[in-house]
Amino acid sequence: MTTIGTTVLGYPRIGPRRELKRAVEQYWAGRIDQAALLEVGRGLRAATWAELRDAGLDSVPGNTFSFYDHVLDTAALFDALPSRFAAIGLSPLDTYFAAARGYGQEPPLELTKWFDTNYHYLVPELGPETVFRLAGDKPLAEFREALDQGIVTRPVLLGPVTFLLLAKPTASGFDPLSLLDRLLDVYAELLTRLHAEGAPWVQLDEPAFAADRTSAELDALRRAYARLGGLAERPQLLVTGYYGDLGPALAVLADAPIEAVAVDFVAAPGSSLAGLPGLRDKTVVAGLVDSRNVWRTDLPAALATARALLGFARQVAVSASATLLHVPYDLDAETALQPKVRERLAFARQKVREVVLLGAALAGEAGADWTVEVARPSPAPRRDDVVRARVSALRPEHLDRVPFEQRAAAQQELLGLPLLATTTIGSFPQTEQIRRSRAELRSGALDTCVYEQRMCEEIARVIALQEDVGLDVLVHGEPERNDMVQYFAEHLDGFATTQHGWVQSYGSRCVRPPVLHGDVSRPAPITVRWTTYAQGLTTKPVKGMLTGPVTILAWSFVRDDQPLAETASQVALALRDEIGDLEAAGTHIVQVDEPALRELLPLREAQRSAYLAWAVGAFRLATAGAAPTTQVHTHLCYSEFGDVMSAIEGLDADVTTIEAARSGMEILGDLQAAGFARAVGPGVYDIHSPRVPSEDDIVALLTEAVRAVPGERLWVNPDCGLKTRGYAEVEPALRHLVAATRRIRATLQ
Ligand code: GLN
Ligand code: ZN
């Protein structure tokens, strides 16, 4: 029996220089063929396996690669993609991409948040018609590929129960869990084949069990691993349930006939192995190195945690806490970080090294490397006494505006907007030209003056287009922003930004989260001149655009030496000052985006109200200084918000625009059920797909919307910002949106 030893549970897959992103986008654009794309994938996999082996890990994970998303890979592997994609008649790879991105008039699968991370997966659609079958061989093929390279990998599979729990039923009342037995047949076949190929271990990820689960769901977990563990010919099984505390699922796994269980001691430092005699003949893979954040591990503390586990399991193996998908590749690639910040950081490559060091120390082999690493100083975070004093002086009245009805009347008088006012979410397409200008500014080929001139020209174009299309509330288009969080991070003190710290958000989309390393303050106004420039070009109102405090935190790597609530207040105060400056410059509408509000929601119910209290408080702290006549918008997306409706109401925004198109306006039911009384704009254009909605498509969505929300409180807008799309799609889509709105308005008047 081979042991696991040191390992990681998953690894970044986009490539250290985003090679995969570039390759798939070139493939979609028809600039490279399938063979060239497959070659890029092969190269990245080979480099990852070699790197992890050479770093000294005892067990190298396999099947962590994906051309788009590992949940989609799983659905494709088991022949569980809706038949509408196969019916198009494309190659298997193109059918896969069609499910991810849509094809012609065929909409893609729904895209949603992966647990409490900023990664997004494609939601499998399962129903009574689903017949699982081992339709592909990705895990097997990649196992063989690594073997050819001389590396025995541990294939990582999405666990069967989590796969079903992540799915969406195609028929109402259908429970995907009812497919478990049939799905287990196919997992059994796959495990048997992996065993035959020589895989000593397979990892099955069940992160769904880091959230609250019903007893039926726990029972499904029990049945699944009794069945898979009971197979006569199989690899050894490691089951993980990272991102939180496994709660009662840990006892289920401890008693299951499997060989190893991974426990995330970073997300759930209080996890205890006491009282679980079933673990005594198992390996516990202890997640001790934070795979969600970028700080160096306190190695002596982690070693102490590992040692305390020794009596409870047959063997303790050291690992990162969850997949390293959520952190950038390599700190060594960063040449511009301040030394005081850099000294505190570790990215994926450095974390692998920490795992190896810890493993050696646990085995009693702490060598010179360990001593050097442990002795390396970790500088103190930046301190700003002014912002600290402001935070401690905050009082409840800083969070309150006059009642909504009063504000709504004052705003309507000032703005005079029509029923079903039309707007967009903020960004317009980031054209090749904009990107080039930004790259030239960075490389020094362009001076700031010329760069800003170009951005102004872009703003003028975007304003002219919006006037021509006939939108009611305009935006400046955000051309000057590389990213909605990074842009603010670059203009606030207390943040550092990276050069190559990319992390996959969904498919080929990557983000570069800033590092919030110290106290936050705003040295100067950030957005005011762009917004006022845009407002000077039109008589229609232009919305000021800010990113909200919760989203700034969620999409940054945040300091872990003080409560998140405190960090959020510091960020909120900077935004509050910015809103004051926007108002002083004549802006009447300000949007504070909180797309990540739902993302940070704790997986366990018991922790949610405390989170929502500070998150809602931070938004209100940022916005409540606005005059009653200033219309505050917020924007939410990437999640289903049904279960946080009261928190959304609690934000006290005047207008909430919210993603809805891809899920067919499911949110309307939630709004009605919650008695949501503010203005709302459910998205009617799915901007995550290249598909252009027709006027009739939008009329159909709006017809539903006006049944749920009265016209004076209903806004018409896309699902999200337009920056990832091209003008060829955006312009007709917006024209259809305005035309559809006019048709519905006519029926209301
Ligand atoms: N204002 C931002 C934009 O339009 C919002 C993006 C988002 O919600 N993710 O790009
Ligand atoms: Zn959005």
Image (tube, rainbow, N blue to C red):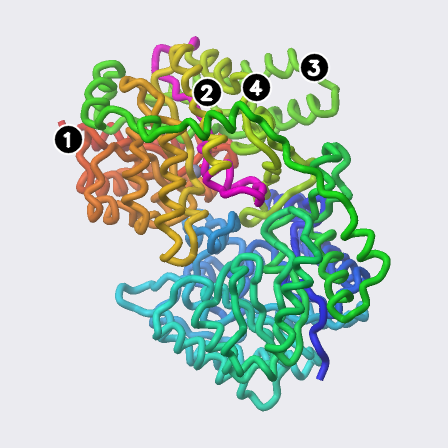
Looking at the image, is 385 positioned above or below residue 119? above
Q: Residues within 10 Å of mark 1 (few under 14, many from 20)?
A: few
Q: Nearer the viewer, mark 4 or mark 2?
A: 4
Q: Is residue 587 magenta?
A: no
Q: Position of residue 697 (x, y in %)?
A: 31, 42
Q: Position of residue 508 (x, y in %)?
A: 59, 46
Residue beneath disc 2:
578
Report which quarter residue 361 is drawn in. Answer: bottom right
Residue 447 image label: 3
For image coordinates 51% across by 47% down, the residue present is 118
Residue beneath disc 4:
523
Looking at the image, is 252 positioned above or below residue 584? below
Q: Nearer the viewer, mark 2 or mark 3?
A: 2
Label 3, label 1: how many angstroms apart (C-alpha)? 52 Å
| Sequence-first disc among 2 and 3 | 3
Report which quarter residue 653 is drawn in. Answer: top left
Looking at the image, is 711 positioned above or below residue 313? above
Check disc 2 and give the amino acid type: Glu
Left or right: residue 13 versus residue 655 is right
| Sequence-first disc among 4 and 2 | 4
Q: Residues within 10 Å of mark 4 (few under 14, many from 20)?
A: few
Residue beneath disc 1:
748
- Magenta stretch bounds: 536-565
